[in-house]
Image: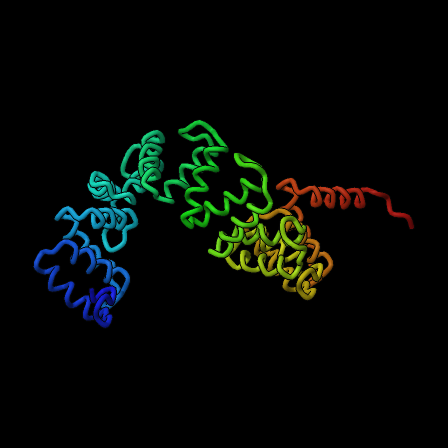
């Protein structure tokens, strides 16, 4: 009651004190709750080690959620020495009691071959069990498997169905991918209204891919009013998270003065961030800025270096540029 403030004035320190008394007497639920308090740093100094110790005490008594949590801590090496073997042991114990998160985690371990031989069929089986019990992460993973045809029959319709289940529970990446499905009419009827709705939900949760996509929609006016300023704002949100395409488009916005004040120096900064992630068009445009000395110190050497990087990835503009440069070099000069 003290932990949640139900019926009495909430005090997390008091909650920890009373939980400790019950935990010391062997109460498994109190031991688990105390572990959670240490893990979150609520009412006590945050300590993954102490959290794991209390989770272990509860897990040893058969507390399913504690077993699952302890398994995850072994999987991540949080407060304990990382061990996929121990992770699998505790996750299995929890799964045997129907702990849904443990079912999903077992699926991940079988898929990745951590602590067990890789087995796509077994991983899929565990995902399905968790998904059927409403685990949004498992539903999302099943959608990915159906989309790729990995371990299951390829089916865009099934992928969309599982994305929708996860998305309805607020799973951000599922919402983003479902938006793509509606954008492409893949497994669902094409719908710009649904596309925008799901990308907006994902973007509001901070999913960079969805934020970038909304920016592109604002640039084109598809499904939303044409709004260059709004596009730049969405690109900035995604770019700040390291999304290369958003960084490139934000750079273009600054070059063109589209939705923001024209600023070649800022354009160069964003092009470079995207270019360093291997974005070919950003590499090409950064090279052009170096060639002109716009927003950066003029450097033919840097210009060619970045444009060659773009050309090596097949960027047509970069290839055309280099072909033109070679043609100019071969042409005889007239006196």
Q: Residue 127 location in percent, x, y?
A: 34, 37
Q: Position of residue 24 (x, y in %)?
A: 10, 60
Q: State left or right for residue 223 relative to residue 10.
A: right
**Residue 233 spot, x, y in % from top left:** 59, 61
Q: Is residue 326 left or right of residue 272?
A: right
Residue 322 or residue 254, whichever sits in front: 254
Q: Look at the image and tell me in which quarter the N terminus lies.
A: bottom left
Q: Quadrant of residue 47?
A: bottom left
Q: Is residue 173 above or below residue 113?
A: below
Q: How many marks?
A: 0
Q: How is the image coloured?
A: rainbow
Q: Residue furthest top?
A: 153
Residue at position x 49%, y 33% from top?
A: 157
Residue at the (16%, 68%) spot, across then down: 17
Q: Tell me the quarter of the picture where residue 211 sits.
A: bottom right
Nearest the eye: 23 or 116: 23
Q: Residue furthest left?
A: 25
User: Considering only vertical position in the picture, is 109 above or below 334?
Assistant: above
Q: Nearer the viewer, residue 41 or 283?
A: 41
Question: Measured from the top left, where is residue 77 in percent x and y?
Answer: 27, 51
Left or right of residue 163: residue 238: right
The answer, for residue 296, to whether it is visible in the render is no
Q: Residue furthest front?
A: 7
Q: For the point 51% across and 48% down, which residue is it?
A: 198
């Amino acid at each position: 009651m003290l932990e949640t403030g139900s019926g009495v004035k909430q005090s997390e320190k008091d909650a920890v004190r009373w939980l400790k008394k019950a935990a010391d007497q062997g109460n498994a639920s109190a031991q688990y709750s105390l572990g959670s308090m240490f893990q979150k740093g609520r009412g006590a100094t945050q300590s993954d080690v102490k959290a794991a110790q209390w989770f272990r005490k509860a897990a040893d008594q058969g507390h399913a959620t504690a077993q699952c949590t302890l398994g995850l801590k072994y999987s991540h090496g949080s407060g304990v020495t990382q061990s996929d073997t121990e992770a699998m042991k505790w996750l299995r114990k929890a799964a045997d009691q129907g702990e849904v998160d443990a079912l999903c985690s077992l699926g991940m371990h079988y898929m990745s071959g951590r602590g067990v031989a890789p087995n796509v069929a077994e991983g899929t089986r565990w995902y399905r069990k968790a998904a059927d019990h409403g685990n949004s992460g498992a539903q999302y993973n099943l959608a990915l498997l159906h989309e790729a045809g990995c371990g299951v029959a390829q089916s865009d319709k099934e992928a969309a169905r599982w994305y929708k289940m996860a998305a309805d529970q607020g799973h951000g990446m599922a919402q983003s991918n479902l938006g793509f499905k509606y954008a492409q009419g893949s497994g669902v009827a094409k719908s710009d209204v649904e596309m925008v709705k799901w990308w907006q939900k994902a973007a509001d949760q901070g999913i960079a891919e969805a934020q970038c996509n909304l920016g592109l929609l604002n640039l084109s006016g598809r499904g939303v009013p044409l709004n260059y300023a709004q596009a730049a704002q969405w690109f900035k949100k995604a770019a700040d998270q390291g999304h290369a395409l958003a960084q490139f488009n934000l750079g273009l916005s600054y070059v063109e003065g589209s939705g923001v004040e024209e600023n070649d120096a800022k354009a160069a900064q964003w092009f470079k961030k995207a270019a360093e992630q291997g974005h070919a068009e950003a590499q090409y445009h950064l090279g052009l800025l170096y060639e002109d000395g716009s927003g950066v110190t003029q450097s033919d050497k840097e210009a060619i270096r970045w444009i060659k990087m773009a050309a090596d990835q097949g960027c047509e503009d970069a290839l055309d540029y280099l072909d033109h440069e070679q043609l100019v070099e071969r042409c005889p000069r007239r006196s």
